[in-house]
Amino acid sequence: MVTQGKPIDIVYPVTSGVTAARLQNDTTDCQIEAAQRVPPQILTTTTPTRSSPTETQCVTKGNTVTCTTTGGEIYGGETYSYDANESLRARAEAQCLSGRGYKLATIPKCPAAYATRPVLSQFYPLSAATCYLPGAGGSYAVTEMLR
């Protein structure tokens, strides 16, 4: 994912000494708890409609009048659904992780120009060199840049 030519940072739960397996279990448990505490509230709405102005032009040739009307196209009126509780559920998940000792940290993508340390099952302590490597299917691994 890219915004204005810059890779997107991830917001990642961190705590010292945690293993990847424990982080995954804690994250899953907190996602389940948040989903139970804040269930989806799917709302459906429709965008406003508007129409372009109409204009009629007539041409007279002898006894014949020919008129052409343009415009009058309808725009908008699309219906879409969204989960009104999505951001509240994300806050509930963050609250759960905080209760388990995690802090949320913003981690940048590892620059291609730098080598990285090996990805371990236990995370490196959070530092200015912490970054993530994107993987297949939206996955990622947190590691450190070597300078």
Image (cartoon, rainbow, N blue to C red):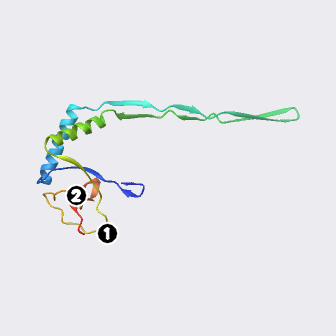
Point 15% across, 40% down: residue: 99
The residue sitting at 23% across, 68% down in the picture is: 146
Residue 21, position as x, y percentages in the image = 13, 52
Residue 127 lies in what quarter of the image?
bottom left
The numbered disc on residue 141 is 2
Question: How many numbered discs, if any?
Answer: 2
Q: Assign a secondary structure to mark 2.
A: strand
Q: Which mark is residue 93?
A: none
Residue 45, x across and y down, in percent: 42, 30
Left or right, residue 107 beside residue 29: right
Q: Nearer the viewer, residue 27 or 17?
A: 17
Furthest-right residue in this view: 62
> Which residue is more in the foreground, 28 or 88?
88
Crowding at mark 1 (Cα within 10 Å: few <14, some 14-19, many 20+): few
The secondary element bearing badge 1 is classed as loop
Q: Which residue is mark 1?
A: 113
Q: CA distance from mark 1 to mark 2?
A: 17 Å
Sequence-wise, the earlier of marks 1 and 2 is 1
Return the x and y of residue 121 as percentages of the image width and height: 13, 58
Q: Crowdedness of circle 2 by 10 Å Cα count: few (<14), some, many (20+)?
A: some
Res 5 quadrant in image = bottom left
Q: Amino acid at mark 2?
A: Ala
Instruction: Return the x and y of residue 110 as percentages of the image width and height.
Output: 28, 62
The residue drawn where x is 20% and y is 38% is: 95
Q: Is residue 79 left or right of residue 112?
A: right
The quadrant the C terminus occupies is bottom left
Q: Which image quarter is the N terminus in?
A: bottom left
Mark 1 or 2, closer to the camera: 1
Residue type of the residue flagged with mark 1: Ala
Residue found at x 28% / y 52%: 10
Q: In the picture provided, is 80 more to the left or to the right than 106?
A: right
